[in-house]
Image (cartoon, rainbow, N blue to C red):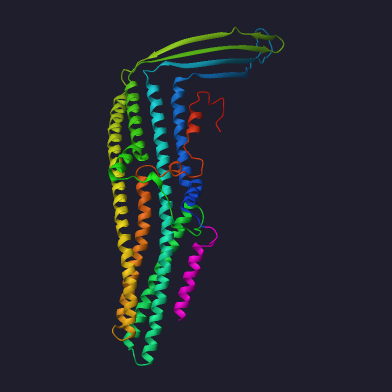
Amino acid sequence: MVLFHSVRAGALALVMCSVPALAHAETLREALTSAYTNNPSILSALLNVKATAENIALAKSAKLPTIGASASLGTTYVAPSATTGADATFPTSLTVGASLNQNIFDNFKSDADIEAARALTEASRYSLQNSEQNVLLAVVQAYWGVIQNTQLVKLAQDNVAFYQAQVNSSNDRLKIGEGTKIDVSQAQARLAQGSAAYEAAVAALQTSQASYERYVGHKPKNLVSTYKVGSLLPKSLDIAINEAVASHPAVLAAKAAIRASQANSDSANAAFGPTLDLTSAIGTGATFLPGVGTSLSQPSASVKLSLSVPIYTGGALSSNIRKANLNQIKSEVDALATRDQVKESLITAWSTLQSATAQIASANSAVSSGQLSLEGTVQERDVGQATTLDVLNAQSELTAVKESLIQATSSKAIATFAVIAATGHLTASDLGLNVQVKTGEDYIAKVEDVWQEIRALD
């Protein structure tokens, strides 16, 4: 009895950690909202979008003028003259000027660089969406992991209580001569096995609670096993595959990477062409000589056009073209691999969903039959037509099918959201979460502003 009470107390304490307040149940939608708002992985992906967007400004700067101003002030020492008898002097000179440099033509290389930067920024946006999906799917897995393991702990607790009751019953039957020591030993062995299974269930629950806190940002609080996905779940596998190929952010990111590599190839080819640059400058100066006065120099201005054509660069330009072409081919191959991976994950999730649905129907029937079988076996044992071992076996079989039902229910829920994620729709906007969707579009629009050095970014 001491073992049973300690196990029951431990299970109650652990379950109460997962269910601190029955007055408020934390829904899956609330958990997803909290994770989207607080998870650092999504924030990291958003910052990557902003950092990648800066490449657009860097690429566009090649087509914009560079304007600078300069000023210098200096003093020169002039030694005294033995011939004229002039004293030493310290003339001070001041020069100021401004310059402007502008690329007029670069064989469209800068246009290709801008296109590549924009394509990579688009790819980073899709990567942000993919990170969002991964985090939200991990939340679903952690959410249902807590629910499943909480139910398994309760089942293990009930199982220990049943076996403890059988130990007590076997001892009572032995005392009145209706049982044997073998019956007692068999019941005690099953009790020990049940206690070990309970400890394993507790450890699994603690692990799932830690995963939940990692993704959601707080400990689980009275989770409920209801959820709605509406029209997000495809009607058939073929429809799901078509949606995945067309909408999954990993596929879209791979397509954007192809466009970036194509633009990089154009840029490498454009480097073989001529470059025309305009350089202009204006300046003036003044010299002050103590005892004499100030003399102003005449303002000067210059304008220069420079045309350059590469003739031989030691093989660097040709190597850049070959490298860019190879990277373009690689991006196309990577896109095919990404598409196949998405299709594989979708088919796997769809199969798991169908299998779990069938297992739930089978397990429900098995639980009903197993419960009747156990009750009948206990009655037969009481009238001497069955043994204690028969009762213990019936309980083990019932526990096994109950575990299967709990696991299948959890698998079905997770597989449902895994199918939605594989089609590219497990996002905050598609789920209708009450959050401000993070896309980085506002920052990209500011980066596209050519006068960004005059108007500071937020």
User: Over which residues does the magenta segment extend?
Assistant: 1-24
**Residue at 33% from the left image edge and 60% from the top image edge:** 360
Between residue 11 and residue 166, name the one nearer to us. Answer: 166
Q: In the picture, which quadrant includes the C terminus? A: top right
| Residue 198 percent location from the top left of the image | 40, 70
- Left or right, 311 with respect to 302, comes to left
* Res. 267 image quadrant: top left
| 346 lies left or right of 212 | left
On screen, 436 above or below 409?
above
In the foreground, 378 or 241: 378
Query: Measuring 29% from the left and 56% from the top, which residue is drawn there?
Result: 355
Residue depicted at x 33% and y 68%:
368
Q: Is residue 242 magenta?
A: no
Q: Is residue 96 left or right of residue 347?
A: right
Q: Is 234 above or below relative to 189?
A: above
| Predominant SS of the magenta segment | helix
Residue placed most toward the observer, 200 or 177: 177
Question: The N terminus appears in which quarter of the rendering?
Answer: bottom left
Q: Where does residue 446 sit, x and y in percent of width and height?
A: 51, 29
Residue 206, by quadrant, is bottom left
1 lies above or below 20: below
Q: Is residue 4 magenta?
A: yes
Figure quadrant of residue 254: top left
Residue 199 in the image: x percent, y percent? 41, 70
Q: Percent from the top left, x then y, of residue 180?
A: 32, 89
Q: Look at 41% across and 57% down and name the residue there.
A: 144
> Across the whole image, how many numbered discs are drawn on residues?
0
Q: Against 431, is 259 above or below?
A: above
